[in-house]
Image (cartoon, grey):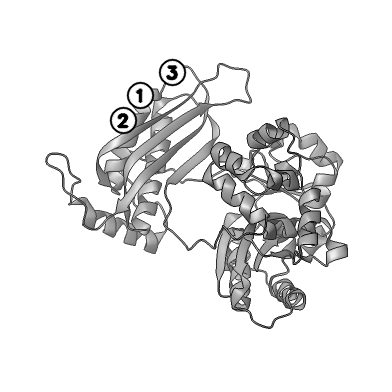
Amino acid sequence: MFALVDCNNFYASCERLFQPQLHGKPIVVLSNNDGCVIARSNEAKAVGIPMGAPAFQYKTLFKEKGVYVFSANFPLYGDLSDRVMKILANYCPEIEIYSIDEAFLDLKSLKNIELKSYSTKMRKSVLKATEIPISIGIAPTKALAKVANRIAKKFPNETQSVYIIDTDEKRTKALKWLKVEDIWGIGRRLSLRLKAIGVNTAYDFCELNSRWVQQNLSIVGYRLQRDLQGKVSLQLDSPQLKKNIAVTRSFERDYKSYEDIKERIVTFAVTCSERLRKQKSCCNSLSVFIRSNRHKSTLQYNNQISIDLPFATNSSIELAKFAILALNRIYRKGYDYKKAGVIVHRFCPEVNLQQKLFDNRDNRHLPLMSVIDELNKHYGPQKIKLASQDPKRQWKMNQLKLSKAYTTNLSEIITTN
């Protein structure tokens, strides 16, 4: 059996933890630079605030409905997520952390355990230690555990936030209840395609001819179908190094100047290189994109380019140089740019890099990058910068509604008299 543990309205629950007066109040959390809604409490959903809503368009509704608005406080959310996951690991060591607020548990090692009471005990332990409410779905496969979790979350009073699919009758009933667009891994486009052939529920999806599924939805769709049929096809994923690293940000204001955008692109490339070095990888290709402000009625321009590097590297100096070359190919004058990003791909280990005949990385950068990383670790991020970065500028987003870092900043912890 597999369990999926999901933190309920996680970001909103984190904000309520240190502000208990917010219980029962509508809460939304905004994205980088307070752009759009990325998380909602049930109360916020009830007053009609959609996911992804641009914050500036909903200011009036926020005020009318008494909605509490917060800037995303990722250090706080990450720390509380880590605490929840450590508690779950004490109950079941075979764990796959699927996202910041979700984890799969493989329960096969738990012998002679009554799953309902064990899960209820686990839920109470998390709630007592962190005040974060969780829902638990248990089933013979990961995909069915997702379904069970959805039922536990949808009907908390009837299930006590724990639901177990342990019979074929329960499985069939759950699949007939679940809409096809709500199946784990079925996106909007695919759901429309399935509906066009009469597939409206997860049960309908399971009844499709398996050969048709494999031919039209690939091996991924085939494994998902088998998992929903109760045949284990998806196992816990072991932790792996990232396959790409992206640093993308909306600007705090519109940028027209090439120099301003270039400075941001360089900073993003430097951050990518730092993350590459942290996981001891180098990249062989790089992408850069720029986007104008789509919320304005001015001329719009969006473009992206990917380039293959002449050699694998994780040097901030070399990646910044390549990022500028990519930017030069897509930058156009006369637009109000609001967002940009750098993405690095095609990783390889930084040790034992194969040497090429002509172009190779500058090995002098290896000890230099090591020293820079140590200095930035000791004195704080971005203390040592490239000359092409603005020495006076700190990478600071608009976060006008940011709560305190209650658990990660000693100067902001709660004090009592």
Look at label 2 and name its amino acid. Leu
Name which residue lies at 77% across and 48% down.
178
User: As rendered, which of 227 and 381 lies closer to the eye?
Assistant: 227
Look at label 1 and name its amino acid. Arg
**Is 27 above or below relative to 116?**
above
Alpha carbons under labels 2 and 1: distance apart: 7 Å
Answer whether labels 2 and 1 touch (C-beta < 8 Å). Answer: yes
Look at label 3 and name its amino acid. Lys
Residue 352, visible in the rendered structure: yes
**Is 93 above or below relative to 198?**
below
- Return the mark for residue 325: 2
Q: Specify which label sits upstream in the sequence, 2 or 3.
A: 2
User: As rendered, which of 248 and 136 lies closer to the eye?
Assistant: 136
Classify residue 194 by image quadrant.
Answer: top right
User: As rendered, which of 274 and 172 lies closer to the eye?
Assistant: 172
Q: Nearer the viewer, mark 2 or mark 3?
A: 2
Residue 349 in picture, x, y percent from top left:
29, 55
Residue 324 in picture, x, y percent from top left:
33, 32
Look at mark 1 in the image and give the residue it sits on. 329
Q: What SS does tag 1 mark?
A: helix
Residue 245 shown left or right of residue 42 in the figure: left
Look at mark 3 in the image and give the residue it sits on. 333
